[in-house]
Image: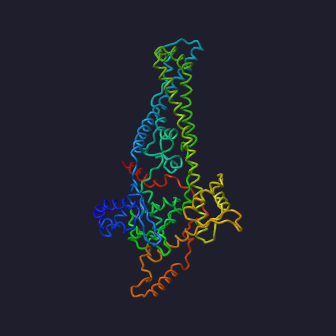
Amino acid sequence: VSTVATAEAQPDVLKALRSLGGRGTLGDVVSSVGLPRDQVEATLNSLLESHQGHLEVSESGELVYLFDRKLIRRDRIPTIQRLKSVAKRILTGAFKAWIVAMLVVYFVVFVVLVVLALVAMTSRGGGQRRGGFGGSGRRHRGFFPGPNFLLWYYIWTPRWRLGSPYYGRRWEATLEKDSRPPFYKKVFAFVFGPDRPEPTQKQLDRGTLRLIRARKGALTTAELVEHTALAMPDAENEMGRLLGSYAGEPNVSRDGELVYTFPELMTSAHGATKVREPNPAWMRMEYPLELTGNEKKHDAVIIGMNGFTLVAAATAPAFIIPQVATYYPSLAWLGGAAAFWGLVIIPVVFSVLFFSIPLLRVLGVRRENRARKARNVRRQVLGLVYREALAGRGSVTVDAATAHVQARMKGRTVDPSAVEAALHQLAAEFDADVSTGEGGEGSLRFSFPAIRKQFLASETVRQRLKLGDGKIGEVVYSSADSEEEASERDQAAFDRELAGVDLTAYLPSPDRVGFEDEFEIVAFEEELKRRAKAKT
């Protein structure tokens, strides 16, 4: 079906979905709009890409398209949120420019003024008479520094380009020395925190597409959760989007499990595809969010500069202004009201704000780190649950899950209640069987047969379709078969598909843990941008 035909049918299909409350089978929509089946199916799949929705299987084995009742677009951003984002970006940009100018300029100005004040005190103590600007003779004029190459090099770096992001010290360590961010970016990070990557959908999809190809073109929602740790409703919604974006096809297994296949992703000019799987969720834990992202030595320099400015400005009426204004006649204007505002009020307010913003951000950073810790606990519990479910070893208890998580998050305190909450959440998502010990005593035991069922379903589809190698499997259906023969052939095919299946092969590194930086998702494109800018 052409893109034009799909676009033409979309208004009618959307109208039909609204009348159906966002939920309906292909037959429901076809009968409502009166368009060809293939055209409606292609339109529904395209809507899964652009609108919030997913597929589910009814009790009778029919595919049901389920969209939000309001048919909300995936890229929809409320107007208020857009306005807030624009206003924040403009104000933050203006404040950043002001910060750099104020911090550096006031620091240099107060260094000069403190030196002049000390010279004035020393000269008075030694009985020297006051002179013009610079005191006795010309020797004090050297205290006014000219352009300092080292200072500018510290503020700038040779191969840095305006607009380039600074994701923190771990990202900086991956760069060549001349490409590392200049000092002013670390000043911004001290106040506002390091830049946060904003990956595109294409960048986010890259790992999932690798997973699909590694799993030979067939994937279930449980397998997506294994690698992303998404909640099941979010994973179902994501699978719906992937289906529409990459020409996926829904398949319903004998047990009523939904398996998504992506034949077009498996086509290759190089024959059979062999792709290394991306790391599972328990090897992609999140690092704690850092307040500044800087190395301690850089934060110390920034604190020292602003602290010096604050102290110098606060004490200027008692020290700098009296000494300099009375000793240097050409600087007598420093005793006026304008100078008081410029050398006391403004720098004091600026320095207090400079320190206050990071202190206020501490609350947000702590809240985010609590959320990250909870997500990391979920990832580790997920690893245990999948390991036990795919091995068919039985149930998981809260105590076993707590011990599992604690052993893998060494050096970090693990709250048993957080582990229990994660286990209960997974139990709700996968409709787990929950039981107690013998006689109704003892801790709760959670078993997850649905996970194994989904993996078995996708494995049978892989073996049947053989999308990875392009071979045609044995005949599983013939129009010449009688009903009894068809049933026997179907059962034989099912037995062949499950013979010798080792589902633990789809559980990479169950006993290993790892972390993934946010910037790793965008690292490839960032490197290409740096190389392109270096050539210009």
Quarter occupied by residue 500: bottom right
Residue 520, placed above or below residue 43:
above
Residue in front for this viewpoint, 162 or 232: 232
Where's residue 144, x and y in %? 48, 25
Residue in front for this viewpoint, 179 or 472: 472
Residue in front for this viewpoint, 492 or 404: 492
Where's residue 73, x and y in %? 39, 55
Residue in front for this viewpoint, 183 or 514: 514
Residue positioned 31% across, 59% down in the render: 11
Where's residue 337, x and y in %? 47, 17
Quarter occupied by residue 393: bottom right
Residue positioned 48% across, 71% down in the render: 59
Q: Is residue 172 visible?
A: yes
Q: How many marks?
A: 0
Colouring of the image? rainbow
Horizontal side of residue 370 vs 22, given as left or right: right
Q: Quadrant of the N terminus?
A: bottom left
Residue positioned 48% across, 49% down in the render: 176
Where's residue 61, x and y in %? 45, 72
Q: Residue furthest front?
A: 19
Residue 184, placed above or below residue 41:
above
Horizontal side of residue 25 vs 376, given as left or right: left
Q: Is residue 136 visible?
A: no
